[in-house]
Amino acid sequence: MAKVHGKGGDVVVLLAKTSYTAGWTSWTLDDGIDTEDTTDFDDGGNSIHGFTVGLYNYTVTLEANWDAANVALYPGATALGGSNAASLTLTVTSGKTYTCKAILKSVKPKVAADGVIKATYEFIPSSALTRPS
């Protein structure tokens, strides 16, 4: 499989017809499904854990250089129609994107004396995730 450098990545956050594209430095997608342990005493000492599949879930985390434009992104910021779901487009490389609508759960600025100010934005799902084909 060919290696792909992260420099081809991109992020677009669209909220209330405003597109936030500047200053993004990385994104992470935690794409998974809940599992619940169903192991009980009758499974015996030499058994492995039993699990049942739960609900599908994902989390998107974006990191950016602190930018005056991105300050407008905060938990509870609402789009037209009262929705606080943003449209996210996460690009791995040209033509390979994940898209979803997600709610901004938290913003975590990080200020260090020896570096630029960064902010981490955590989004939780409000729609299904569309994966690249």
Image: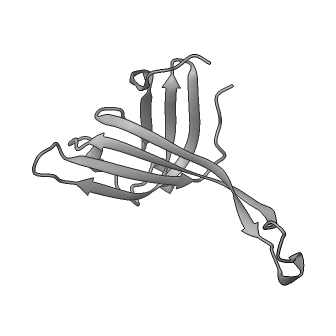
Q: Quadrant of residue 24?
A: top left
Residue 25 relative to residue 82: left or right: left
Q: Position of residue 56 (x, y in %)?
A: 70, 54
Asked if residue 123 shows in the view, the reply is yes
Residue 57 relative to residue 21: left or right: right
Q: Quadrant of residue 36?
A: bottom right
Residue that extends furthest to the left in the rendered view of this protein: 113
- Taking depth in this image into account, of 58 and 81 the one nearest to the observer is 58
Q: Is residue 122 above or below residue 68?
A: below
Q: Residue at x 58, y 23 (%)?
A: 96
Q: Residue at x 16, y 42 (%)?
A: 116
State which quarter of the image contains the N terminus: top right
Q: Is residue 42 above or below residue 120?
A: below
Q: Residue at x 45, y 49 (%)?
A: 79
Q: Position of residue 111 (x, y in %)?
A: 18, 53
Q: Quadrant of residue 46?
A: bottom right
Q: Position of residue 110 (x, y in %)?
A: 23, 54
State which quarter of the image contains the C terminus: top right
Residue 19 relative to residue 129: left or right: left
Q: Is residue 127 above or below residue 38?
A: above
Asked if residue 18 shows in the view, the reply is no
